[in-house]
Amino acid sequence: MNKLILHIPHSSKYIPADAVYMVDQNTVDKEILKLTDWYTDDLFSLEDAITVKAEFSRVFCDPERFSEDSQEVMAQFGMGVLYEKSDEGIPIREVSPNLREAILNRYYWSHHKQLNQTVEQQLKSYGKALIVDCHSFPSTPFVRDLDQSPNRPDFNIGIDPYHTPESLTTASREFFEHKGYTVGIDWPYKGTIVPLAHYQKSKNVASIMLEINRALYLDEPSNVRSVNYAVIKSVVNEFLELMKSHYDQAMYL
């Protein structure tokens, strides 16, 4: 049976015990509270889907950044693949070339290897693969966010011109609008993850990102579950079922 691939990169709070920071634990915890995509590993769940989850905090290593700072726009703020500054621009650690290589090899590349292998398995078995890139975002922009627009949508659909079929984008937008939610396409965040081995090489590897406005399911800024949590989880589940239906019917080439 065809299976959706749920990519969940930012739900973990775990930072390895041997990680060294130049700030106190309270400062690190503040960043974790602010930057974690809370409960996305629970919100995005579907029977028979394959989940690829990063088991480490993005504050330690961000698997959705480019590995080379020269390619990563957020590196200019000290928030490339290995964050050296907080959202507010406070230096939090120094990353030497040796430390960088060690962390990337043990955590970053291991995560991407798992994602790529999962995609390869789907291609081998069914000739196609669909990744849903699973995120949430704060109702007010982070200090370092590239888009500082104050009126953010309820849901953000991130697309790739090569790897996101237009029919998938349209179905996603119509799904949420029909339920009365506002939707941004590549706003306030752009793009969706695709393994580099397949990037712009095969349209049989499709990908779409869903970002959920945290005000829908959390009490900000404490980020505890709100009374609406179950409702939003149900909506997300319906969305995933829709993606699965399209995946079953579609041939991406």
Image: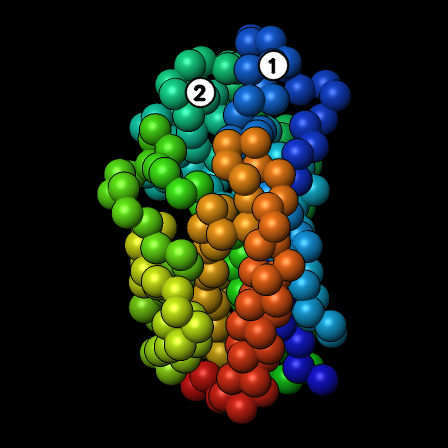
Q: Nearer the viewer, residue 125 or 176?
A: 176
Q: Which amino acid is tagged 2?
A: Lys
Direction from residue 118 to residue 200 in the image, left or right: left
Q: What's the colour scheme?
A: rainbow
Residue drawn at point x = 32 percent, y = 49 percent: 152
Determine the secondary structure under disc 1.
Answer: helix
Which residue is more in the foreground, 233 or 101? Answer: 233
Q: Secondary structure at mark 2?
A: loop
Calculate the distance from the C-alpha at mark 2 to the C-alpha at mark 1.
Answer: 15 Å
Q: Quadrant of the N terminus?
A: bottom right
The percent coordinates of residue 201 (x first, y second) are: 42, 70
Tag 2 residue: 85
Q: Residue 158, can we see it?
A: no
Q: Is residue 146 left or right of residue 223?
A: left
Indicate the position of residue 72 as horizontal and vertical percent values. Answer: 37, 39
Position of residue 57 relative to residue 97, above or below, is below
